[in-house]
Each structure stands twice: as C-alpha cells, then as structure tokens.
Image: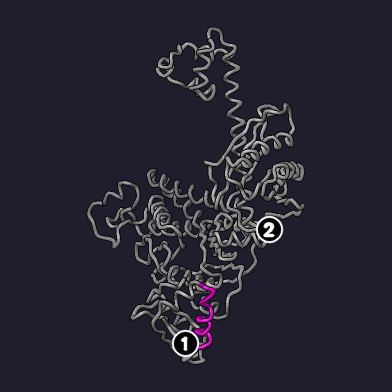
Amino acid sequence: MVSFEELQKAPDKPGVYIFKKGSKHLYIGKAKSLRDRLIQHYKLVEKDGKERAIIENSDCVEWIVTRNTYEALTLEVDLIQLHKPRYNVLHKYGGGYPLLLITEEPYPTIKVVRGSEHEGILFGPFFNTSKAKRVKRLIHKLFKLRTCDPMPTRKEPCMDYHLGLCSAPCCGLIDKDSYGLYVRSSIAMLSGEVSQILEELYSKIDQEMQKLNFESCAVIRDQIQALENLSLGQKVSGLRYRNADVHYRMGRLVGVFLIRSGRLVDKQVITLEREEDFEEFLLGFYYTSPLPQNLVLNAEISEEVLWWLSQRGSFQLSREIEPELEELIRENLGEHLDPGLLKGEFMRVLKLELPERIEGFDISHFYGDYTVGSCVLWEMGTMNKKGYRRYRIKTLEGIDDYKAMEEVLTRRARRLKEGEEKMPDLWLIDGGYGQLNVALRVRDRFSLPIKVYALAKEEEILISEKGEEIKLKEHPILYRVFGLIRDEAHRFALTYNKHLRLKEGLKDVLDNIKGIGEVKKKLIYRNFENLYEFLRADDSKLKKLGINPSVKQEVAKYLLG
C-alpha cells in the first residue's frame, strides 16, 4: 500500500503520475500539481471505493513532470492506451469502435477497421460490429465493390461475383470509370450526400439503356432506389444537425447519439463509475474514432480536453440541443436505470427511499361491460410478472371507475393485511385526484404502511397523497419507472378485458347452436380460449375431445348469418 509520506514527496508541478503494483500499471492520472492531486487521492480513500482500491492495491507511485497541463494530458492519454491500467475509464472506451473504411486504391474496397490511422475515407463509428458488417455487405450487394483484399489478378471471377457482391475488377469485367461511379455512390450512401451522385446514376442508366445493357440497368436502378429512399428518409426525419455526435450526460449516465444525414442512426448509453470520469470517457471515445462536423455536449469540459480534441481534427462545438432531439435523448437515457442513480432521483425529487416493491393498478371495461382491474408489480428495477393479479369486478354494473377501483384495492388490501401477499412500499394508481382519494381511503381503512401516488395520463403528472404535482417529463428517470408501471397495468387490464369478451362471445354463440348440450359446451369452454381458436382447430383434435367437426361448421354458418 502506498503511504501518505510517499505521496507528499511529489513535486508541486504539472505532470503525470502512475500508481503501480510491481511492474503492473494500476492507474494513470494527470495534474496541475502532482503533490496536491496525489494527496487528494489519499484523502478520498474513506469516501470513494475506487480511490481506496487504487491506494490499497498499489505498492509504489511514480511521476513524470511536464512543462504544462496540455503536455500532461497528451502524455496521460498515450500512456493509458499503452499500458491499459485497470482503474482507468479511458482504456475501456479507447480501444476503438468499428469503422467503415473506403480505401485509397486504384480500385477501392470497403473494410471494417478500428482506429483512425488509415488511408482512405472513414465512416462511423458503429457501436456494434455486426451492424458494421451488415452495412459493409449492403455496400457490396448494391455497389459491387470488390470483396478480395488485396485485389488479385484472375482469369475467372470468384463466387462473390456470381452472388452479385462484386463487379470483378480483378478480371477486367468493369472499367475504371464505372467502378469509380460505384465508389462515389457508396460514399454518398454512407455520408448521406446523395443529390449529386443521383444525377450521375441517372445519366449512367441512360447510357446503358442505349447500349441495351439491361442487366447493368437493373443494377443501377437498385442503386438509385436505395439512394432515393435514403434521401426521402432525411426529409421525413431531418434534425438540425446533419452530421453530429451528441454526448448527453445525466448524472453518471452518458448517452452517445450519432446523427448522420440529419437522422439519428445509432446510440449507446454507458454508466460511469463517477460523474467526474466524463472527460476521461470523452478522450477515450475520440482516441480512435474520428471527430464529426459537430460535437454537441450538454456538459462543460476543460480547456485541456478541448485543446486535445482540436488536435485530433476540426469540429464545431455546440451546447444547443433542439427540444425534439433532447426529448428523444432523455427518453432513451431513462431506459437505463442505474440503481444508484435511481435511488438518488427518488430522494431528490420525491424525498423517498428507493422502493423495493411498487404495485400499479388500472381499470378497463367495454362500454360498461366486462369491467376488470389489474395489479402489476415492479420489484427492484424490473417488472415481476409472477406477481401480476387480475380482478373481475363483481359489485357494480355500468360505468363507475371509482367504485371499480375501490373494489380492486379493497380485495388487494385484504390479502396484504392478512399476510397472504408481501407488502409493497408504494401504490401507483392510473388516474387523477379522484382515483387517488379512493386509494387513500382504502389504505387508511386497512391501516397499510404504503405510500400512494396517482399518475394523470394527459399531462403525465405524478400526484402525491399530499397533493404535490410532479411533471414527470422533466424527470425522465422517474418517468421511465412510473410510466412503465402505469403502461403495464393498462396493458394487463386491457388484455384481460379482451379475453373475457372473446370467452363470453363463445358462450353466447354456443347457446344459439342447436344440438350442443351442456357437456359439449363445457368441453369447448375448457379447451378453447375463444371463437377464433375453436374455428381454427383441426378436425382430428375435435374428434379426440369427442366433438363432432360438424359443430364447427354450424358455428361458422351462424356467424355468417
């Protein structure tokens, strides 16, 4: 373990420090003052598990003094990429995401590569290798770029030519000008700049038609259709930025959203160990990935990081995110619920400890008939479908959602009070103040230790039992939790309502078919969920059940009138 006295020996100068265990690098950092930063590491041991692990697992610390903080940053990044220290975030994200490369050769091809040091034009990054490979294959299929690398000299084309994946420049089956058009078309598709290349393709298809090269015309036609579809998609879903990487930080969550050709094409959401690791993540991301035309951030970054990025390439930094894009981003981030972040949001916004169990309730009916209720269970971050319960309302006829909700909650409360079900921490009621008051009456009648909230669907407002109103769209993490529970309760109630209608529909029809006695009705009710399932049943299955297939024909005749 590194001692405090050893850290105090560091100079009060900028530089890079290295925590080591033997010859193994555990953590590399930079600092304006090496001494102050190392002492800060030691002081954070009691509060921060990562800091404690770094100090306790290290047996020595080394440092390199630099002339300024910019040099320190550059050296830090290079050393991290060289040694891959266990506790550095940067090395986890600096290994390189897959990119597509259009090579710089007489007959270029397309490759899946990593890192930015390549001759040619790079496109990406892709967060998924299989996706990069699918796009590569699409380029081969549409634009016939060669599949061999390096390009051989052959007398006969390989199987890829016969499969329509290559134009066989190795055999001289395509001239250089035509191949060049296919390369420019590939670049247009990957970049989204299709207008100019479409004119060339239309001109080319006219030339091929005059030569009666119908097979070549068919290939170019498919290329034109693909590029026109891309152009149409841009018009429909265009965003303010045509080419941008958006890094949106929300606590320890960081969403990376790639905008290409005015469309959101890919996303990745990561959870940082600490909020202060954001800059390190950003450096790792662009260590091997090319910078876009626009870099959009919702968080401040230091001058050193901005300088480092500027050395990687030219870009326009912006912190303006259009409302439509920001709403989409926050919804995507809300899907990734880190327990620590979720706990913090419950405490910050609702002043509540994170509930272990939340039960959600909803009512569904069909114009006053088949009224049912649902109870769904959210448990430790996920929906627990084994805990779902459904209720058929027994105490009322017609439409009265309040009385229906009271019956469902009363039946549920009775089971909770008697210990037949595990007590939840919170009830979520689908509705407004009226449904909330019903829930509070039932809770108080049974003296249940449960918090109660209602979620009004129109404006997505969460209402507390004290009448406080929280606009959930302003808190996407909580919206993800409560919106999910509310939507699942609605879906489960609606599904049960439909099930009953179909089941009752089967009974109503069978009552009107002559020759079907009570025994046969019970057989059909037990073995078929609804009319459609009965009508689709094989005759052999009906015979095994002792039901004459002619009954199915009679039902069909009745339905057809």
Circle 2 sits on which residue? 350
437 or 525: which is nearer to us?
A: 437
Residue at the outermost top position: 515
Q: How many marks do you count on the picture?
A: 2
Residue 7, numbered circle? 1
Q: CA distance from mark 2 to mark 1?
A: 43 Å
**Residue 37 is a magenta residue:** yes
In this picture, residue 267 sits left or right of residue 439: left
Q: Quadrant of the N terminus?
A: bottom left
What range is drawn magenta here? 35-48
Q: Amino acid at mark 1?
A: Leu
**Residue 73 is a magenta residue:** no
From the top left corner, tell me how far across and down residue 427 is, in percent.
Answer: 66, 47
Q: Quadrant of residue 328?
A: bottom right
Neighbourhood count class around disc 2 (C-alpha, 10 Å): few under 14, some 14–19, many 20 upward: some
From the top left corner, tell me how far across and down residue 439 is, in percent.
Answer: 71, 43
Q: Earlier in the sequence, mark 2 or mark 1?
A: 1
Q: Quadrant of the C terminus?
A: top right
Q: Is residue 45 visible?
A: yes
Q: Are marks 2 and 1 in contact (CB under 8 Å)?
A: no
539 or 198: which is nearer to us?
A: 539
